Amino acid sequence: MATNYISSHTGSEIDAGISRVKTGGDVDAHITRTDNPHGVTAAQSGADPAGTASSQVSAHEAAADPHPGYVLESNLGTASTADVTTSATDTTAGRLLKVGDFGVGSAAVTLLSGTDFNTMVVGGDYVITAGINGPSSGTVSLSVKPTHFGGRVKQEAYITTVSGAQEPIGFARVSSSDGTWGPWRKIYNEGNILPTGAPAQPLTNGAIIERSSNSNGEYVKFADGTMICTRTISVSALLNLPSLGGYRNSSVLVNFAAGFSSIPAISLVPVTDQASFMSYVSVATGSTNICFSSITLQPDSTRSGYLIAIGRWF
């Protein structure tokens, strides 16, 4: 049979208890207690036994690599704690480069107007306008390359604002071991080797000297416009026409290996005993009329000689 607890208390006691519950005085006091009023053990609550947590923390901190998924600070190297450069031309020792410093991995570094080229000794790519001691007072793209030869530095500069230029014009110079700079030297290539007035079609394969041959002999073209044509001449000639106190054959047309832009100078050398000399009757840009001569009549025979023509191809 159930016990009737209410019946064991007077009505005033019940009312007082209800009042205390309503006001929360006993409940609040119970909640704020820290002396484990219910006597709950660590094992009952699932907690580690007293002292075990601190020992585990100490073991974790003492472990050589407690977090194998992360890089140890000791393995990061000096780069992880080094300062980065403060500008694109910062040369402070030990600092880390950023993308774009000294033109690395990005566009060339634009320097102040009036920069002295003689002071540019740190490797990199730069753009200088109205610089001092440069190959031009205009905008110049400059590449600086320190060498392994006694502290010498090489500079290559390209002028990009030349009016009408098909491509940049390059210059280069090298400093001596004491820092003295040599003169700027122009860098020649197939795009700028031909002088003003040259034909639009440059020499074959962009060469500065072109040499070739055909059925009319050989020729050599130089980038400055000079051309030399040579060939061996061999004809059947009867020397029976009076000429200058001797005799010659009827003139023979001889073509050059390549055409000249103007009348070339001609040199003729006989290589047979039957003719004492050779001469030309007329000269054009693509050919000449030549003859063999002798002081006496000479019968019809194969006669040979050598021709050299020097002039211009443009």
Image (cartoon, grey):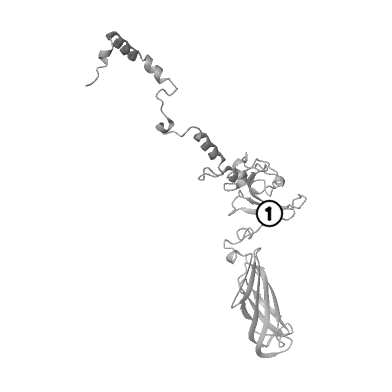
Query: Label 1 crowding class (10 Å Cα cut-off): few <14, some 14-19, many 20+?
Result: some
Q: Nearer the viewer, residue 4 or 206?
A: 4
x, y percent for residue 313: 63, 67
Q: Where 130 falls versus 270 (above or below)?
A: above
Quarter of the image that includes the N terminus = top left
Q: Secondary structure at mark 1?
A: strand
Q: Quadrant of residue 227?
A: bottom right
Direction front: furthest residue: 1
Kind of residue indicated by mark 1: Ala
In percent of the image, x 49 and y 32: which residue is there? Answer: 50
| Position of residue 201 in the picture relative to residue 24 (left or right) | right
In percent of the image, x 73 and y 89: which residue is there? Answer: 296
x, y percent for residue 254: 62, 78
Direction left: furthest residue: 1
Examine the rendering and report whether any part of residue 31 can be seen: yes
x, y percent for residue 276: 73, 84
Q: Nearer the viewer, residue 94 or 248?
A: 94
In percent of the image, x 59 and y 46: which residue is there? Answer: 75
Q: Where 276 falls versus 34 (above or below)?
A: below
Q: Nearer the viewer, residue 133 or 164?
A: 133
Examine the rendering and report whether any part of residue 184 can be seen: no
Q: Nearer the viewer, residue 109 or 284?
A: 109
x, y percent for residue 233: 65, 81
| Position of residue 240 in the picture relative to residue 55 (left or right) | right
Direction bottom: furthest residue: 299
Quarter of the image that includes the C terminus = bottom right
Residue with the mark numbered 1 = 172
Q: Quadrant of residue 35?
A: top left
